[in-house]
Image: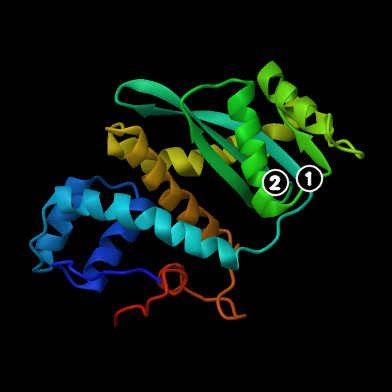
Amino acid sequence: MLHFKGMRFPIDVILVCVRWYVAYPLSYRHLEEMMAERGVSVDHSSINRWAIRFLPLVEKMARKHKRPVGASWRMDETYIKVKGVWKYLYRAVDKQGKTVDFLLTAKRDMAAAKRFFDKAMQTNGDPEKVAMDKSGANKAAIDAINAGRDVPIVVRQVKYLNNIVEQDHRAIKRVTRPMLNFKSFRSARCVLAGIELMHMIRKGQFTTDGADMTSFADQFYALAGQVRPV
C-alpha cells in the first residue's frame, strides 16, 4: 500500500502525473502545462520527485500480480544516457515477447550480466534456454551460473533469435527519448521501473484480484492499491 501522508496534492493528481509520464513520450514540463490546462498548478520538479518516490514502489507491488513467463528467454542490453554518460539496461523477454525482467547497470561486464540473471531467476524461476548475442560477458555470466547447477541452462548465441527483445527495446526508447537524459542514476532506475511496468501492463502480464482489468489506467491504479478516480 502506498502512503501519501503529508503530500500537498491529492492522490489522484500524483498518480495521474506519474502514470502519464511513464506511459507516453512526455517531459515533466509537458505534464506541468497539461495539468495547468486542467486547473492544477504543479511544478515540473514536484512531478519529478513523485516519479522517483512512487514509481519503484508501484512496480514492486505489481510484481506480486505478475503472470509467470516462459522458460525460453531472449536477453540483451540497450543503452540509456545518464548525466551524458551511456549506461546499460539489461532486459529479457520470453519467446512470446513477455517481459521477464530488467536491470540498469553502470557497466557492461560479466558481473553486471550475472546480477541481472540472478535478479531475473530469483523472481521468475530458472530458464531452460537463454538466447543472446555474441557478447562474451553475457556468456561468461551464464557459464558461472551453470557451474553450480546439475542441469545447465542451454545458451543459444544465434542473432535472429534475439530479434524479439531488440524490437522490444523500442517501446522503452520511445518513452525515454523526450526525457532528454536522466540527471542521476537513481532517478533513471526509478523512472525506468515505471516505464517497464506500463509496458508490461500493455502486454497483459498482470492479474488483479483474479480478474483481468480492461483498461491500462485501471490496471495501474489497481496495482498501486488505489481506485481509479472518476
Q: From the viewer's side, name the closer residue of 92 and 103.
A: 103
**Residue 49 % position (x, y):** 23, 51
Vertical position of residue 14 compared to residue 164: above or below: below
Left or right: where 155 falls relative to 75: right
- Badge 1, how many Cα within 10 Å: few under 14, some, many 20+? some
Vertical position of residue 222 compared to residue 118: above or below: below
**Residue 26 % position (x, y):** 28, 47
Q: Are marks 1 and 2 in contact (CB under 8 Å)?
A: yes
Left or right: where 40 falls relative to 170: left
**Residue 136 % position (x, y):** 70, 17
In the rendered picture of this protein, how many numbered marks are placed on residues?
2
- Badge 2, how many Cα within 10 Å: few under 14, some, many 20+? some
The three-letter amino acid code for the residue at tag 1 is Pro
The three-letter amino acid code for the residue at tag 2 is Met
Left or right: where 130 falls relative to 203: right
SS type, badge 2:
helix
Q: Is any part of residue 157 visible from this angle?
A: no
- The residue singled out by tag 2 in the image is 121
SS type, badge 1:
loop
Left or right: where 168 falls relative to 185: right
Vertical position of residue 45 compared to residue 217: above or below: above
Which quadrant of the view contains residue 175?
A: top left
Task: Residue at 58% x, 28% y: name it.
Answer: 112
**Residue 192 % position (x, y):** 42, 44
Which circle, 1 or 2, is nearer the viewer? 2
- The residue singled out by tag 1 in the image is 127
